[in-house]
Image (tube, helix red, strand yellow):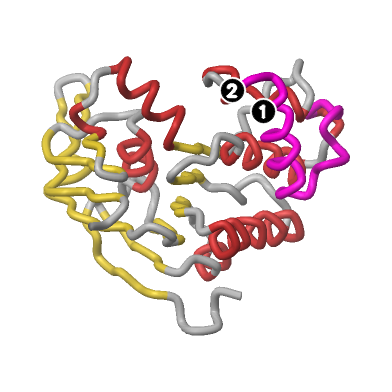
Amino acid sequence: MALVEIRDVYKSFQRDTQRIDVFTGLTIDMEAGSFTALMGPSGSGKSTLLNLIAGLDKPTSGVVRVAGAEVSAMSPGELAAWRARNIGFVFQSFNLLPVLTAYQNVELPLLLTHLSGKERVERVRIALDVVGLGDRGDHYPRQLSGGQEQRTAIARAIVADPTVILLDEPTGQLDAKSSQEVLTLLQRLNKEFNKTIVIVTHDAHAAERAKMTLHLEKGDLVEKRAAVSGAAR
C-alpha cells in the first residue's frame, strides 16, 4: 500500500458565479521513502495537491489517504491533531516568526505535543544539527541569510519526526548556492533518514534531485518520470 494515496479526486473552486475545476478524477500513489517533485505551469494544481495531502484543503470528492488515515474525511479537530503528528510543511516565504530565535521557531510545533521540556530541547538540538545550524539557534531570522532561514524552516518541519515533508517552491527565493545547499539537505533527509518528501517546483534543477517527477497540466497528470540513475546525486 502506498504511503500517500490520491483516489479519483475532484477539486473545484467557486469564483463569483464561475466554477473553476482544478482536478477532475486525479489518481496518484506515492511510496514511503519516495522523493517526488511536482512540476507544471502555474495553475496546474501543484500547490492545491500539496494542500490536499497536508489536510489544509479538502477535495470536492474522492479520497486522500496518508499512512492509512483518510485525511479527506477528518473533522477540523481531528485534522489539526493528525497534521501535528504527520506533516512537516515548508512554505516558500519561510513563515518564520521574526520575534523568535531560530531555536524558538523550530520548537513551535513541539509546544502542541506532550513532550517534556528536556525532550523538546533534545529534539530541537538534533533538528538544528541535521540542517547545519547547530550554532545559529540564538539568532533571529533577520540575522540569518535566506538559505539559513529556509534551513531553519526545514528544521521546524522535521522536528516532530513527521511522516511526510511537503515543500512549496523551497528554492524559489534563494540564490543558486543556497538552492543547491537546500536541495542537498533534502536529498540527505530522504536517503539517510528515509523521509518521504514532496516538493512543488518550477526549477528543473531542483526536480533533478528527486527520485520521481510528476508533471501536472490543467489538473491532469500528463507525465510521470523516474530519475535517471545517477541524476539524483
**Looking at this view, is 214 or 28 the one in front?**
28
Amino acid, disc 1: Glu
Write down the region rendered in magenta: 115-141
Q: Viewer-proximal residue, 195 or 16?
A: 195
Which quarter of the image is occupied by the N terminus?
A: bottom left
* Quadrant position of residue 61: top left
Does residue 134 show up magenta in the picture? yes
| Residue 207 relative to residue 76: left or right | right
Write the residue at 82% across / 26% down.
140
Q: Looking at the rendered structure, which numbered label has been put on residue 119?
A: 1
Secondary structure at numbered mark 2: loop
Residue 207 point in image, percent of width and height: 50, 64
Which residue is disc 2 drawn over?
Answer: 115
The amino acid pointed to by label 2 is Leu
Choose top left, top right, bottom left or bottom right for residue 128: top right
- In this view, the residue farthest toward the bottom is 229
In the image, residue 197 sits, relative to residue 16, either above or below, namely below
Against 214, residue 89 (above or below) is: above
Quarter in which the C terminus is drawn = bottom right
How packed mark 2 is, by other alpha carbons closer than 10 Å (few <14, some 14-19, many 20 or more), is few
> Is residue 68 highlighted in magenta?
no
Residue 40's x, y, as percent?
37, 57
